[in-house]
Amino acid sequence: MGSGDGHGQDGDGQAGIGPSAAASAPPAASARPSGVLSAVLTGLTCAALLPLGAAAGLVGSFGAGWLTRYWDAGATPQVLAGTALLAFVALLYGACRLVAWGSRRQSAALAFAVGYLATLVVLVAYLPGGDVVITGHLMHYGYLFGTMLALVIGVVHSGLSRLPSRPSPAR
């Protein structure tokens, strides 16, 4: 029997051995990462994203100080500051979701958010000489609560895509 006779055999007479069978075969179990390797990679990813979130929190918090720089100059700087704050909060939400998407784990988004919020808590501290970075201004409160809300929603939404879908109703 030849290879063109439609009986599923190769030219050498062996069934299921050939390029088409090899391409449709499932990957070997050894090609998939083990549970231990997956846990180690997740831990290393979280260990890398924690300081990245802390650095983003540091840069973002010092940037939030500029939101009030020209606050007393009138309505135009106030509108620009509010728009900038909303844009920053949206970018932060997107960054949190992007981190979760890139790692395929909700724990990565959580590590990024924990690093960011830990820095935020340190920079909100009050010392005898005054506030550290974030003051008691309306825009700074908007920054604090906006970033917290964006990070929480980003972490929660990053895990929602993995929920099992509802089964379709039987007909």
Image (tube, rainbow, N blue to C red):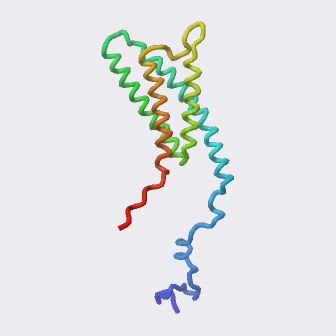
On screen, residue 112 above or below 4: above
Residue 78 picture location, percent across and down: 35, 17
Q: Residue at x 65, y 49 (%)?
A: 39
| Viewer-proximal residue among 22 and 90 | 90
Q: Quadrant of residue 81?
A: top left
Residue positioned 53% across, 86% down in the render: 9
Quarter of the image where the C terminus is located: bottom left
Q: Is residue 163 left or right of residue 50?
A: left
What percent of the width, then of the height, locates residue 35?
66, 55
The residue under the point 48% across, 37% down is: 95
Q: Position of residue 79 (x, y in %)?
A: 33, 20
Q: Nearer the viewer, residue 23 or 126?
A: 126
Which residue sits furthest top?
A: 129
Number of numbered discs present? 0
In the shown orientation, is residue 29 left or right of residue 84? right
Q: Position of residue 50 (x, y in %)?
A: 60, 34
* The furthest residue to the left: 75
Q: Nearer the viewer, residue 21 or 148?
A: 148
Give the residue at x 66% y 57%: 34
**Residue 153 appears left or right of 46:** left
Asked which quadrant contains residue 27, the reply is: bottom right
